Amino acid sequence: MRLFAVVFAILALAGAAHAETYYTDIGDSRINMEVPDGYCALTGENENESTLMEMMDAATADGATFELAFADCVELGEWSQGQRPSVDKIAYIASADEARFAGFTGDQDDFNRGMDAKFSQMPESELGRLMGDSTGRSQAILDRMELDVQLEQTVSLGYLGYDSSATYFGVMQKMSFGEGTEKTIAGVYSMITIQGKFLVLYLWGDYSGDAGQIDELLETVKWFSGLQHQVN
């Protein structure tokens, strides 16, 4: 596990809530990674953070390398002081093996068009097509998925579209936290191309049961993804 062996702070103030920029070397490219305002990078300086980072590293898909994790600063501070049982809103960035995306030049617009052509009409991307629909159909899809997802299982919420910064997908998991405690978490991730390299940015949050939360996660990930381009 690499953790932060090649990730170094450029603007690092411990516990700061303002934006911070980190970098990593991917092949022959130095890629900057932005931690947004209100979020703090996990450093692994205490046992809880180290354990959380190890979990995210282990969850990183084959063909990708865990690079950087960050969480809501308020939640992180309360969790570190034992005032809350977990951090509910957490994000991480992984670098993806270019071989996974053979045929793409690394240009974001080219990548977006290719992903849209591949995923937009797939049945599992119905949720993305219904986001913001006022009839409640997106809520019905999520309700069904929440009932169907099994413990320690991940289900795809499908393709959620793209913008100039990234292509977006959703996921849902049901996790066990010991002593019979279970909770469902939802996530949105983006696929970003910078300097011909591929990054995947995840944001996870406790799932409230409301379809509006997926919209909120998506909008936040769009913000995060745009920042990655701005610092490069």
Image (cartoon, grey):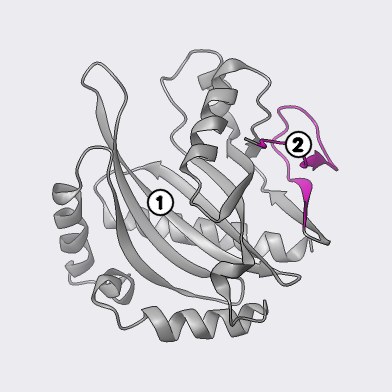
**146 up-or-down from 79: above or below:** below
**80 up-or-down from 28: above or below:** above
Task: Please name the residue shown 47% across and 67% down the image.
Answer: 168
On the image, the x and y values in percent for residue 148 come to 15, 50
Start-end of magenta stretch: 2-26
In the figure, is residue 228 to the left or right of 117?
right
Pointers 1 and 2 in contact (CB under 8 A)?
Answer: no
Of tags 1 and 2, which is closer to the observer?
2
Q: In this view of the protein, which residue sits in the foreground, 24 or 212? A: 24
On the image, the x and y values in percent for residue 128 come to 33, 71
**145 up-or-down from 129: above or below:** above
In the figure, is residue 124 to the left or right of 196?
left
Task: Please name the residue shown 47% across and 15% down the image.
Answer: 83
On the image, the x and y values in percent for residue 209 come to 24, 47
The magenta stretch spans residue 11: yes
* Three-letter residue code for mark 2: Ala
| Residue density around tag 2, few if under 14, some if 14–19, many if 20 or more, within 10 Å | few
Which of the image's four quarters has the N terminus? top right
Q: Which mark is residue 187?
A: 1
Q: Which residue is mark 2?
A: 5
On the image, the x and y values in percent for residue 210 come to 26, 51
* Three-letter residue code for mark 1: Gly
Q: Main secondary structure of the magenta part?
A: loop
Give how far apart the Cα atoms at labels 1 and 2 are: 26 Å
Quarter of the view holding residue 216 = bottom left
Which of the image's four quarters has the C terminus? bottom right
Badge 2 element = loop
Badge 1 element = strand
In the figure, is residue 28 to the left or right of 18?
right
| Residue density around tag 1, few if under 14, some if 14–19, many if 20 or more, within 10 Å | many
The magenta stretch spans residue 187: no
